[in-house]
Image (cartoon, helix red, strand yellow):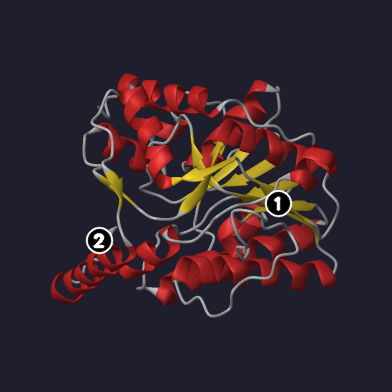
Amino acid sequence: MSSVSCCTLVTGATGLVGNNVVRRLLAEGRSVRVLVRRGSDARPLAGLKVDVCYGDTRDRQAVSQAATGVAQIIHSAAMVKIGRTNIDQFRAVNVEGTRNVALAARRENIRMLHVSSTDAIGTKSLEVAADEETPFDKSITTPYLLTKYEAEEEIAAQVAAGLDGVIVNPSFMLGPWDWKPSSGQMLLEVGRGRGWLAPAGYFSVADVRDVADGILAALEKGQRGRRYILAGRTMSYLDGWRLFAQVTGARRPLRRLGRVGARLVGWVGDLGTLITGNEPSFNSGAIAIANLPRNYSSARAEAELGYRNRPLVETVEDTWRWFQDHGFV
């Protein structure tokens, strides 16, 4: 760790959310420290004037060292995949890692902003959007969703013990600087002509740049112990994929994948997991989530943080252009 004076620590700085947050902080002239694992992709931080600490959020000592002397922490590091396997790994990263960051923030007596997900919130219907008070469906056993909920429970416990903690819950996001790629993989697949049949459910699509703005607003103005949904436009996967196809010039999706067909696809994916030991993106957990009416209200963030969404077509166009400019297509 260098001796550069630093005010904001960001975990998960090589990911979609974290990297956009880092760039937003730097654009405002703020000093930034990042905690990244050794061997992480170097491209997201190339050319950025940040203080780099190497370590893992699962390592309490590494987190403590990285947090020493900072004024605030944005915790966006997480293990993200919708599936049925590896619950222990998810808990180690998403729950224990969050606990380590929260303990470090408490020790330093500083604010911690935890980047959660709308996946830690239940769903209602297309007519009634879920909000911050909508309870999580505890019958869900998908490791990612379950551990994001458990991480919020950890934050609540730490707040009760004195942590100055705030939670944001972004929905599905698109935008630039998606090096992995993460959620942008969906746009890439449709853009490559592979989106013939869309899932039957609905999703809320936000621009990661708007989410980054919401994160910084919550860091400054969010109420202690409060959560804020940072969602976007709710639409069917079919309509979303048709927009993706329109922007990318790809073949339009034909129709929705029926629920029986979806279950069959999920079963095939699960069978492949048993045979190969590698879980594909099309598995029963992912299919089940994709069939939900994922409709969320950002009214609280709009009223208290000034959160706003740009036009979705602008988001899709900018994301696709970024992928083109960086050799993904």
Q: Residue at x 27, y 29 (%)?
A: 328
73 is higher (above) or lower (below) than 149: above
Residue 105 locus on image (x, y percent)? 74, 58
Contact between labelled residues 2 and 1, with CB atoms less than 8 Å apart: no
| Nearer mark to the viewer, of 1 and 2 | 2
User: Residue sitting at 47 percent across and 65 percent down?
Assistant: 144
Above or below: residue 328 compared with residue 166? above
Q: Amino acid at mark 2?
A: Pro
Q: Secondary structure at mark 1?
A: loop
Amino acid, disc 1: Thr
Q: CA distance from mark 1 to mark 2?
A: 40 Å
In front: 280, or 178? 280
Instruction: List the residue tagged with mark 1.
Output: 68
> Dividing the picture into quarters, in which one does residue 160 lie?
bottom right
Mark 1 residue crowding within 10 angstroms, few (<14) / some (14–19) / many (20+) = some
Position of residue 18 measured from the top left corner of the image (x, y, whole percent) = 55, 41
Q: x, y (%) of residue 115?
A: 63, 52
Tell whether 107 sits left or right of 120. Answer: right
